[in-house]
Image (cartoon, rainbow, N blue to C red):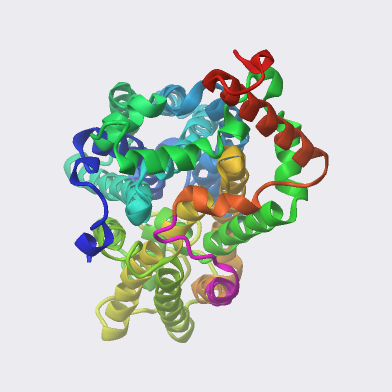
Amino acid sequence: MYREKVKDTPKKVLNPKLWTGVFVFGLMGAARGLDEGLIGTTYTLPSFIARFGLEDPSLSTAERADLLSNIASMVQLGSILGALIAFWLTEKIGRLWATRQLCLVWAAGISIFLAAAPTGNIAMVYAGRFIAGVGIEQTTVVAPTYLAEIALPAIRGFRVCMFSGSVYLGIMVAYFASWSSSIHLTNSKQAQWPIPNSLHIVFSSMIFLLSFLARTLATSALERLRKLPSSHPFVQQELKAIVSQLPHTQAPLSQTPTLLTSLRALLFHAPNRNKLLITLSMQLLSQWSGASSITMYAPYYFSLIGKTSNKDQLLVTTLLGVVKFVSAVLCAIFLIDFIGRRKALGIGISLQLISLLYIAIFLGVTGNATGPDPESASGGTHPTTTTTAIKPNTHATHVAILSVYVSALAWALGWNSIQYLLPAETFSLPLRALGSSFTTTAHFATQYGNSKAVPRMLLAMGGGGTMGMFAGITGIGGLWAWWWLPEGAGRALEDGDNDDHVDGEAGMELEETENVNCRRRQAERGDGDERYRR
């Protein structure tokens, strides 16, 4: 299947230079995965709970739920700001320098977070996680855009899914780190939670250093990436497609479309506006389908199902990380480019819907009631889980745990791949960074709302009601995919740009840029007006 897909691609194109860029930028997905995995297990560690008062008896159940959600969601709140500045930074300083600065911001925020360990200063936790979120979010704009631009059309889905796959690499590593810490470090040691969270510093430093290996310079960059001379027909074909868009992107500063012009082109031209609506609705439906909340609050969901021991919760959560990572890798290699985006998403949503429905019915039938659990994971009062008479070793319980794993596989096949791939494929080059920035802003705004709301939802609706709502939204997402999702498998990024020229004032400015640059290229070839020569 893979050979059939790349049969027309010269072998030299798939070379170490290309794979270096793919690896460096793909690895940035671990930023999100690490945070979701680490914070999702850190607040179950007794040392963290005691230090920051997550089970303070003077607080009400609702207040404890709010404290937990504030800590968990602060990165998502910072990510909204990161999304707003990612477009500007990417366009001004380029993909590589944007990567380096986001690594520094990410590491600085985590350093402040870790510095709260000796004192238990909750303000430092909030500030550090907010700043880290500003850096972490930018990975979702920089990396998928870069990967889509350097990838071959035949296997672009695989390359971009390297990013989503590394998200799950981060989650898996984070789960293992917290699980190991709970086993090998006693609950009285404050190092129990800072040690696994220091993985943020390790990954940000590694990506920062590796970014100096991924250099990009026009035709010479294509020669290095493809390992072919610039005269080779394969390179010429790619250059021709790219050059067709240069009028929009390579104008001198005085002719470069302003942010306002780009905004008008994106918001007021019907084809571009439709693309934006598709990507925004995708983020809303995917984030409220429940998968991200399961990742972030996995130990609590497993406690609802019947895993009452803290170590048991962390163990099954760690296995969930393995399932997520393996599923993401297999889907990226064998499915996303070969069965198409729509079919992959359809299968993923179907499996996710079935698994969520089972969990919702299971929690409803087994008498999951609203109220505090007197025997929480750490031995105190749990802020979100509810009183239940579930027996931990029944067949129904095992199927419920299996359903959580199936939902993870379904998410990897469906929404997770599409949410990064679709914005990178949908928008034309002049609007790609801006469109991706809009999309990721929506992504983290909805994820913030979800992560902030889930603890309160579990109190008010119980586990069955919460999972039932997620199942309903997943079903709506299936209808959306059937009617709206475009298919981009095997298509060059430039192929869909012919309908992106815009009307009105924004279109006139962009077209003027195109005319000036066409005349300049003609002058430099010697067959145009000399006034336009640089």
Find out whether residue 487 is within the magenta segment: yes
- Where is residue 45 drawn, in percent x and y? 33, 46
Residue at left offset 29%, top offset 34%: 225
Image check: 449 left or right of 232? right
Magenta stretch prevailing secondary structure: helix
Residue at left offset 53%, top offset 32%: 134
The image shows residue 162, relative to residue 345, as above or below, that is above
Answer yes or no: is residue 341 visible. yes
Nearer to us in this view, 106 or 228: 228
Image check: 271 left or right of 90? right
- Where is residue 299 drawn, in percent x and y? 36, 58
Nearer to us in this view, 220 or 93: 220
Residue at left offset 28%, top offset 62%: 327
Quadrant in which the C terminus is drawn: top right
- Where is residue 270 drawn, in percent x and y? 74, 56
Find out whether residue 390 is within the magenta segment: no
Residue at left offset 50%, top offset 60%: 384
What segment is highlighted magenta in the picture?
472-491
The image shows residue 106, relative to residue 33, as above or below, that is above
Quadrant in which the N terminus is drawn: bottom left
Q: Which residue sits furthest right?
A: 505
Q: How many marks?
A: 0
- Where is residue 425 drawn, in percent x and y? 49, 52
The image shows residue 282, relative to residue 304, as above or below, that is above
